[in-house]
């Protein structure tokens, strides 16, 4: 899933994201809640209509940015108290409020609010945090069930009340519940740090609550790569085989292949878009950094095996010039390429699975992307 | 002509510039000379090949940026001595060198080096400057004639020597003359400030030298709009009817219509692209500034009469959000719209001329674009 933090996949137009074959993008609840605001988006008919993207959207819970971006955060059982990084305003993000905000956004997949543990953590801290995340997951599930049976719907026919079956707790007159996508799914998140017995406990408890899909959170936060892979492998195995398994916040192209091999179906990562804006490009023969002087007169495309617009049309020499000259089109062209490489990698993985050649593909891919020394 | 300063029309991809129907873009010799360098571009086969744009390109002489951007410039009869705004390096831009640089770039239309007079200027200053520009125009024409008969050609078959008919003065072994587009045309530039008799003298002298087309320079620099229109009208009338007449650096949409009415065929201006990045949008009912809070929940497109990608897909509310959030896509989407408005205005002008309805079009256009008070 390309990351569309603030309702836009950075440095791209949605037409290009569609042409690249993205089937779903991710939106960040924290950012959209602060600006332009979930209530404004709900009045405009939900996130799809507001941003002009009709394919699926997954929204995170807002928790990760509260932990990583917001200021003076205080986590209590009720929720996360924090100050906006934009204007310092205080907000309380509870599990219920995260569900409400995502209901207003009307994403196709909403994530539960979890506590994000920093790495490294002691076993006791990881256990306490994981258990709180399980309790929050239960509250998120309850809240979504309430919303599904009561509240208002706003879609392209305008806002209207749908039958109230039960009470809608925590809804105040100034912040009415508003569901812009009645079919919204909800995924639970497995936590537990790098302690596999805690991961197992979290997976079982989360599955017991019952969600439409399951994510593995709290990885790709600084732990050794082998630790990540082994936690992914053991945890994915414990999750229902016929529901989506989503590894949050990973990773490199190699991570995609290695984690699909361990049972993961879905990924999101800012790496292809963020690195593109910094001049780091992914290719079938490893990474290259377009800033490097060696590319000043290099007429080859970024990746001779790539069919994206950037590689069909422009040389490394031109892309280096645009980057050095500070042109916005450098970010745009680099982003097109990196997203193409990531989405193409996922397509090749799917094809290899269908044609039962995944193991050969995996070996060849890993050999290929590590062929050249990175000059990043 | 959309302005492609550094080899890129800012915040766009060339695919979009093509789809919008741009038939020619402008490149800035000063910028390309400093970075990545005209010799590098020549080694890569010229500007078209280097940037991946196969339609026509016009390059300016570099003079305007030397006068407006460069530091510590000293103008003498030989040329303009200046320091790069990038690294402070000293350079001497002579008429011959401007021709040589543009020959290396291989644009389809090269401009002569002229002296750019600041406004207001005394009659004496305007006369002296205009006469120097005429002398420089003669030197530019002579230099191009020399290059056309001697030197090297670099195209997609690689650099090779073409028959030497005469000497190539001012070519040193470390900066050989290099012609990447043997069919390059050259336009003269009429100067003379706001003094019509000086304009007339400049026009006659420039036409006497003989160029492939003629530009009017030194306008749109702060003079009253009526002065600009009357100088354009009288000067255009004095230029050959069957060769292109190009008004440099103008202007607003109204300027396009008013100056076509006075005999102008070609324009370039950074206004559509620069203003777009600052949130100012041109519409069939006047300008609007997307930053304005009144657009926060406005579901209408920028211009209901516009068929561009931005207007087909996105609301003012979304575009305001992107702008306020600092997303690069704000600049990209706004630029697409403004370029579309400018290029569409020129298409409508051409259609109106063909169908002999230009006067009605002109009246309706001016009434329409001034209908709403600007909120910029």
Image (cartoon, coloured by chain):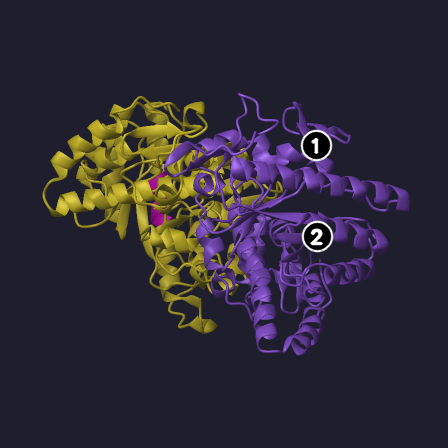
Chain colours: A yellow, B purple
Q: Which residues are magenta?
A: A133-139
Chief SS of the magenta region: helix
User: Per the image, is B139 magenta?
Assistant: no
Numbered label tally = 2
Q: Which residue is at a point 42% across and 54% down the rendered structure image?
A: A14
Q: Which residue is at a point 63% across and 35% down the rendered structure image?
A: B98
Observer-nearest of A342 and A373:
A373
Observer-nearest of A105 and B151:
B151
SS at badge 2: helix
Q: Quadrant of residue A274?
A: top left
Q: Is residue A257 above or below residue B263?
A: above
Q: What chain does badge 2 belong to? A: B
Pointer 1: what residue? Answer: B70
Q: Is residue B54 above or below residue B81?
A: below
Pointer 2: what residue? Answer: B207
Residue B228, percent across and down?
A: 79, 58
Residue A292, percent across and down?
A: 44, 25
- Marks 1/2: CA distance? 30 Å
Observer-nearest of B175 and B255:
B175
Q: Which residue is at a point 12% across and 35% down the rendered structure image?
A: A359
User: Are circles 1 and 2 on residues that touch, CB within 8 Å?
Assistant: no
Residue B213 shows in the view: yes
Q: Is residue B374 above or below residue A340?
A: below
Residue B303, percent across and down?
A: 58, 67
Q: Residues within 10 Å of mark 1 (few under 14, many from 20)?
A: some
Same chain for labels 1 and 2? Say yes or no. Answer: yes
- B299 relative to A162 in the view: left or right: right
Checking the image for residue A309, the label placed there is none
Residue B61 shows in the view: no
Q: Residues within 10 Å of mark 2 (few under 14, many from 20)?
A: some
């Amino acid at each position: 899933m390309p990351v569309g933090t603030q309702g836009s996949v950075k440095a791209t137009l949605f037409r290009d994201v569609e042409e690249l074959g993205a089937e779903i993008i991710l939106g960040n609840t924290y950012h959209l809640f602060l600006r332009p605001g979930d209530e404004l988006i709900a009045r405009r008919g939900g996130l799809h209509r507001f941003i002009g993207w009709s394919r699926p959207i997954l929204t995170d819970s807002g928790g990760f940015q509260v932990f990583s971006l917001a200021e003076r955060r205080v986590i209590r059982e009720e929720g996360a108290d924090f100050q906006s990084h934009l204007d310092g305003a205080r907000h309380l993000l509870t599990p219920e409020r995260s569900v409400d905000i995502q209901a207003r956004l009307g994403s196709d997949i909403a994530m539960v609010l979890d506590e994000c543990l920093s790495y490294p953590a002691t076993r006791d801290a990881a256990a306490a945090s994981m258990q709180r995340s399980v309790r929050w997951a239960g509250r998120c599930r309850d809240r979504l069930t309430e919303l599904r049976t009561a509240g208002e719907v706003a879609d392209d026919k305008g806002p209207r009340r749908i039958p109230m079956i039960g009470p809608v707790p925590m809804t105040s007159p100034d912040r009415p519940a508003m569901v812009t996508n009645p079919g919204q799914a909800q995924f639970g998140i497995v936590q537990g740090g790098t302690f596999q017995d805690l991961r197992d406990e979290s997976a079982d408890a989360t599955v017991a609550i019952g969600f439409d899909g399951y994510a593995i959170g709290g990885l790709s936060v600084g732990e050794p790569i082998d630790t990540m892979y082994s936690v992914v492998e053991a945890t994915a195995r414990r999750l229902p085989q016929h529901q989506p398994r989503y590894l949050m916040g990973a990773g490199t192209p190699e991570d995609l292949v290695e984690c699909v091999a361990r049972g993961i179906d879905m990924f999101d990562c800012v790496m292809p878009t963020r690195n593109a804006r910094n001049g780091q490009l992914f290719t079938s023969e490893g990474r290259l950094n377009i800033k490097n002087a060696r590319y000043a007169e290099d007429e080859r495309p970024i990746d001779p095996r790539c069919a994206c617009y950037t590689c069909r049309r422009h040389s490394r020499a031109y892309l280096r010039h645009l980057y050095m000259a500070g042109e916005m089109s450098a970010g745009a062209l680099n982003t097109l390429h990196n997203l193409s490489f990531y989405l193409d990698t996922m397509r090749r993985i799917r094809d290899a699975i269908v044609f039962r050649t995944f193991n050969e593909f995996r070996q060849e891919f890993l050999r290929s992307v590590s062929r050249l020394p990175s000059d990043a």
